[in-house]
Amino acid sequence: MAQLDTRQKLEILADAAKYDASCASSGSVKRDSRGGKGIGSTDQGMGICHAYAPDGRCISLLKILLTNSCIFDCHYCINRKSSNVRRARFTTDEVVQLTLAFYRRNYIEGLFLSSGIIASSNYTMEQIVEVARSLREDHDFRGYIHLKTIPDADPELVHQAGMYADRVSINVELPTVSGLKRLAPEKSATQIEGAMAATKADILDTADAKKRYKSAPRFAPAGQSTQMIVGADAATDRDIVGRAAGLYGKFGLRRVYYSAFSPIPDASAVLPLKRPPLMREHRLYQSDWLMRFYEFSPQEVADAADDTGMMPLDIDPKLAWALKHRARFPVDVNRAPREMLLRVPGLGTRAVGKILAARRWRRLSLADIGRLTVSIAKIRPFLIASDWRPVALADKLDVRTLVAPKVEQMELFG
């Protein structure tokens, strides 16, 4: 490997990390260095921003790989063993010093560290843990740390990673076991799920200990997350929703991230030639949102898919579900339970909360609802208000044409 300076390594290894989507920093504990103790903070996002947390907070992370060399040969990965990319490798001390230097310049508020597999899974995991250990123990770094762990590494090493990191993540890589066997034959779905189960047990054990003993150490207080690639295999959106629901249920994941497959240079012949529409990734995130915040069951979300098992790209999954279940609408905003209000297309969780609070004092009109939503035209066929009942709209067969977003040609000038 040619001798590279730190700037050249950073150029290569920051670019190689761009395929990792799971770097949001929400859910961590608050730490700061006020009073002159330690360095770093997880309170606020300042400086250059790289991503947004689910709560809308702007965050900035130094997102890099320890190395893009790898002994695995996963077909979809640009850093696979047979890939003809430029290789680089940081030492653990280089990552530590880069993180501290970037933080002091107000460029970042934390570190996201992943790595290709070098020498062995255990050796690579030891290097990742050493970066986090040095930041926390040698430099009293109190910023955010997210570590990507390696499923077949020694469980004790994965446990140590969680003791230093705010969040750990283990990628399931592909939505189906058959897809994983075909595109990443050196990885094991059993090992991946075993590592997730062990991490869940550690999180629960330490959370329980923290309730009993104030001095008990924390373990990954921001939980664990995962990422799956969309469009590299034949999995449908219905398959992906089912897989995500299973991961949330079995392993208590904080987030499942979806990454649309991106064709890479010198790609394997078993991969598709074209990337899936980015809108597909967006629709999957909306589906995920329905399960996590709108109390939709996985089966209800899957029902939004069409006969091929794919989510429609022209309308969001919640509207698609409502159009397929017209018999459950219209919903009376002055009487319906929260569960049904959350199923009205165009009503978000915040709007539903305001409706429930306001209707304790008076009956709500269509104009009242209009002030809580972006488009009253979208929701009129689905609700009843004190001065509105969609008698004609409710029976129309072409409601979709009335409520679907209008496709408009963008102007090049003006």
Image (cartoon, helix red, strand yellow):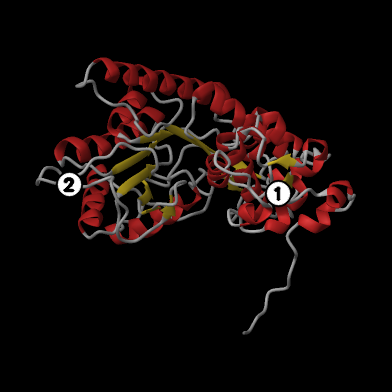
**Kind of residue indicated by mark 2:** Ile
Kindly tell me whether residue 5 is visible in this rendering.
no
Quarter of the image for the C terminus: give it.
Answer: bottom right
Residue 200, picture quadrant: top left
Q: Position of residue 156 (x, y in %)?
A: 33, 20
Determine the secondary structure under disc 1: loop
Relative height, residue 366 to residue 27 (above, below): below
Disc with the residue nearer the chain's start (1 vs 2): 2
In percent of the image, x 81 and y 40: which residue is there? 326
Q: Is residue 269 left or right of residue 17?
A: right
Q: Position of residue 355 (x, y in %)?
A: 58, 44
In percent of the image, x 35 and y 54: which residue is there? 60
The front one of 376 and 411 is: 376
The front one of 127 and 409 is: 409
The front one of 185 and 241 is: 241
Relative height, residue 113 to residue 250 (above, below): below
**Kind of residue indicated by mark 1:** Pro
**Number of the front mark, 1 or 2:** 2
Q: Position of residue 88 (x, y in %)?
A: 37, 51
Q: Is residue 218 left or right of residue 194?
A: left
* Residue on which disc 1 sits: 272
Q: Is residue 393 left or right of residue 100?
A: right
Relative height, residue 215 to residue 268 (above, below): above
Kindly tell me whether residue 294 is visible in this rendering.
yes
Determine the secondary structure under disc 2: loop
In percent of the image, x 43 and y 41: which residue is there? 116
Q: Position of residue 274 (x, y in %)?
A: 70, 55
* Residue on which disc 2 sits: 39
Residue 5, picture quadrant: bottom left
Q: Residues within 10 Å of mark 2 (few under 14, many from 20)?
A: some
Q: Which mark is residue 401?
A: none
Q: Residues within 10 Å of mark 1 (few under 14, many from 20)?
A: some
